[in-house]
Amino acid sequence: MALGKDYVNQACAMARALELVGERWTLLIVRDAFYGVRRYSDFLAHLHMPRAVLAERLHLLTEGGVLVKQPAENSSREEYVLTPRGEALWPVLAALSAWATQELLEGEASWFYRHAECGTLLPDRLTCTTCKVRIHPREVLMEPGPGADLTRTDPVSVACRSPRRLLQPIR
Ligand SMILES: [Zn+2]
């Protein structure tokens, strides 16, 4: 059963966050936005989710200031792009996926993340132990790990077969 839209008796920050990003699919849409997905059709092809739910979640994320809807360059289409508020969710996604890789997938990572500048692997996806700096997701290079599914043929999966920077538009 879907959760209610708000947690009326919960005044804490976690409840506020979950109102915005706690529903099914929502964090996967945000994750895809970090992979560089911007088009509705690319979210749809990559996530295999119901159209109506995708439209509703994109609306919620736009209303909540996580994504902004804007005209695509050189096209009449519209696209969804992470705002600074949306980009600030990267440590949340990073921690959640690092936890799942360790605890649920026996360490078999779908993706490896490196500091683009020096190539150092970023186990926490956030800090470079070589450069001793915290990394903005724009400076993170992702590449397929042993758990990646390389058989999928949608535009997002194909783009992600090769090393690519986070937030770089898929096309
Ligand atoms: Zn580095």
Image: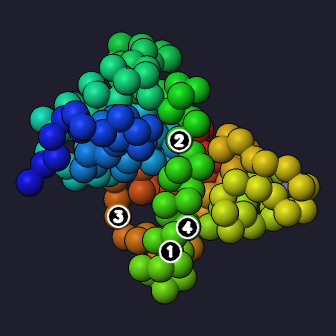
Residue at image location 32% in from the left, 51% down from the top: 46
Q: Earlier in the sequence, mark 3 or mark 4?
A: 4
Residue at image location 81% in from the left, 58% down from the top: 128
Q: Which residue is mark 4?
A: 98
Q: Which residue is mark 3?
A: 152
Q: Give the x, y percent position of residue 81.
A: 47, 27
Spatial separation of the CA atoms under disc 3 and disc 1: 21 Å
The secondary structure type at the circle numbered 4 is: helix
Residue 50 picture quarter: top left
Kind of residue indicated by mark 4: Ala
* Residue 155 visible to an observer of this rendering: no
Q: Which corner quadrant of the figure contains ligand 1?
A: bottom right
Q: Which residue is mark 2?
A: 89
Of badges 3 and 1, nearer the viewer stands: 1
Residue at image location 42% in from the left, 33% down from the top: 38
Q: Which mark is residue 142?
A: none
Assess disc 3: are there few (<14), some (14-19) or many (≥20) residues with their C-alpha within 10 Å of its C-alpha. few
The secondary structure type at the circle numbered 1 is: helix
Spatial separation of the CA atoms under disc 2 and disc 4: 14 Å
Kind of residue indicated by mark 1: Thr
Q: Answer whether labels 2 and 4 touch (C-beta < 8 Å).
A: no
Of badges 3 and 4, nearer the viewer stands: 4
Residue at image location 24% in from the left, 50% down from the top: 24
* Residue 147 visible to an observer of this rendering: yes
Q: Which residue is mark 1?
A: 101
Relative side of 153 to 122, left or right: left
Q: Answer whether labels 1 and 4 touch (C-beta < 8 Å).
A: yes
The secondary structure type at the circle numbered 3 is: loop
